């Protein structure tokens, strides 16, 4: 097996891990939205009193992580294509 073939296999493995991580982040985002809705329903007139601000920051962090994975995946694909 050539070194190039081994490198391409390794890059493919990385892509699989990144795809799996993106799926887990999407699942996490769904759970976060459900938790936020459940908490807000405790006091529908004043949800800001029961929904911790950290939930919104967590959603922002998940969004950033998904964006980074998407950009990294595109760069990885470009790199593999040039090989």
Image (cartoon, grey):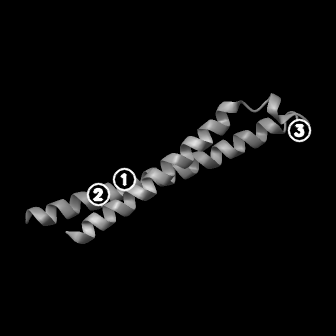
Q: Answer with mark 3 or mark 1, whichever residue precedes in sequence.
A: 1
Q: Examine the image and state in which quarter residue 79 appears.
A: bottom left
Residue 30 position within the rendered picture, expressed as x and y whole percent measured from the top left = 64, 49
Q: CA distance from mark 1 to mark 2?
A: 6 Å
Pointer 2 residue: 13
Determine the CA span between mark 3 and mark 2. 46 Å
Lateral position of residue 20 relative to residue 43, left or right: left
Tell me where residue 49 appears, x and y as whole percent: 82, 28
Q: On the image, numbered disc 1 is attached to which residue?
A: 17
Residue, x 78% and y 35% (percent of image)? Answer: 39
What residue occupies the far bottom of the structure in this picture? Answer: 81
State the residue at coordinates (71%, 45%): 34
Q: Is residue 49 above or below residue 73?
A: above
Q: Which residue is mark 3?
A: 44
Please say if the residues under marks 3 and 1 sit with CB atoms less than 8 Å apart: no
Q: Residue at x 62, y 37 (%)?
A: 57
**Residue 19 seen in this snapshot:** no
Quadrant location, the N terminus: bottom left
Front in this rendered view, residue 6 or 79: 79
Which structural element holds mark 1?
helix
What is the secondary structure assignment of the residue under circle 2? helix
Distance CA(mark 3)–CA(mark 1):
40 Å
Rate crowding at label 3 as few (under 14), some (14 to 19) or many (20 or more) other CA atoms within 10 Å: few
The residue at 55%/45% (across/down) is 62
Q: Does residue 13 sit above or below 63 in this rendering?
A: below
Nearest to N terminus: mark 3 or mark 2: 2
Locate residue 31 relative to residue 9 in the image: left or right: right
Q: Which mark is residue 2?
A: none
Q: Are the residues at dot 1 and dot 2 in contact (C-beta closer than 8 Å)?
A: yes
Expressed as whole percent of the image width and height from the top left, the position of residue 46 reads 88, 33
SS under mark 3: loop
């Amino acid at each position: 097996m050539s070194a190039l073939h081994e490198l391409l296999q390794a890059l493919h493995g990385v892509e699989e891990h990144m795809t799996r991580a993106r799926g887990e982040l999407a699942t996490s985002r769904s759970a976060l939205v459900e938790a936020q809705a459940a908490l807000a329903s405790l006091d529908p007139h004043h949800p800001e009193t029961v929904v911790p601000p950290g939930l919104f920051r967590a959603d922002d962090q998940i969004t950033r992580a998904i964006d980074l994975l998407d950009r990294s995946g595109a760069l990885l694909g470009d790199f593999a294509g040039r090989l």
